[in-house]
Image (tube, rainbow, N blue to C red):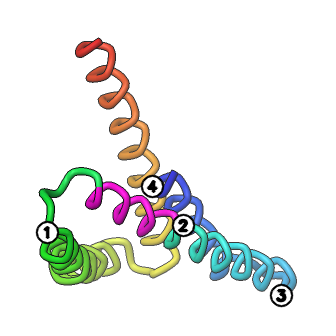
Amino acid sequence: FSLLSLSVIFMLYSMVSYAKNPIIMWASLLIAELLRGGTFAVFWSTVLIHIDKHSPNGTNAMMLTIMESIYRGLGHTLGALLGGLLVSKLGSIADTFWYAGFMILCLACISTFCAKKLSLDTA
């Protein structure tokens, strides 16, 4: 759910730059931000449930710290670097958001296919 929502959010962000009508611009921005808030909440509650379920007793705080470090440290750093490279290659932030949204959509489809394939192989 989070990857699909993220791809829609990125595509809506690209529409903000291309919209000629201010109502469409503000509507796409509002929808993107509302969807981003819901996606963020679902993502982190899923992470917390997964950490609580799979970490050994007494290590929940350490596992959450590791996850937070990976998310904020590695994820934000790589996102900024790759985003900067895409903007320099594509020429505009709107195009970067559009292509990033499409790449994330492809990633969501591939990961869903692989997860279903793995679940069928283990059953």
Q: Which mark is residue 22?
A: 3
Mark 2 and mark 4 lie on one chain; the one further toward the N terminus is 4
- Answer few, some or many: residues within 10 Å of disc 1's Cα (few below 14, many 20 plus, some between 14 and 19): few
Under mark 3, the amino acid is Pro
In the rendered image, which quarter contains the C terminus? top left
Q: Residue at x 65, y 74 (%)?
A: 32
Residue at 52% across, 71% down: 41
Q: CA distance from mark 1 to mark 2?
A: 28 Å
Q: Secondary structure at mark 1?
A: loop
* Residue 20 seen anywhere in this rendered image of the structure: yes
Nearest to the eye among marks 3 and 2: give it: 2
| Residue 104 as seen in the image, left or right of residue 63 | right
Query: Mark 4 packing: few (<14 Cα in 10 Å), some, or many (20+)?
Result: some
Q: Which residue is mark 1?
A: 58
Is residue 58 shown left or right of residue 104?
A: left
Res. 75 in view: no
The image shows residue 121, relative to residue 115, as above or below, that is above
Q: Nearer the viewer, mark 2 or mark 4?
A: 2
- The boundaries of the magenta stretch are 42-52
Q: CA distance from mark 4 to mark 1?
A: 30 Å
Residue denoted by label 2: 39
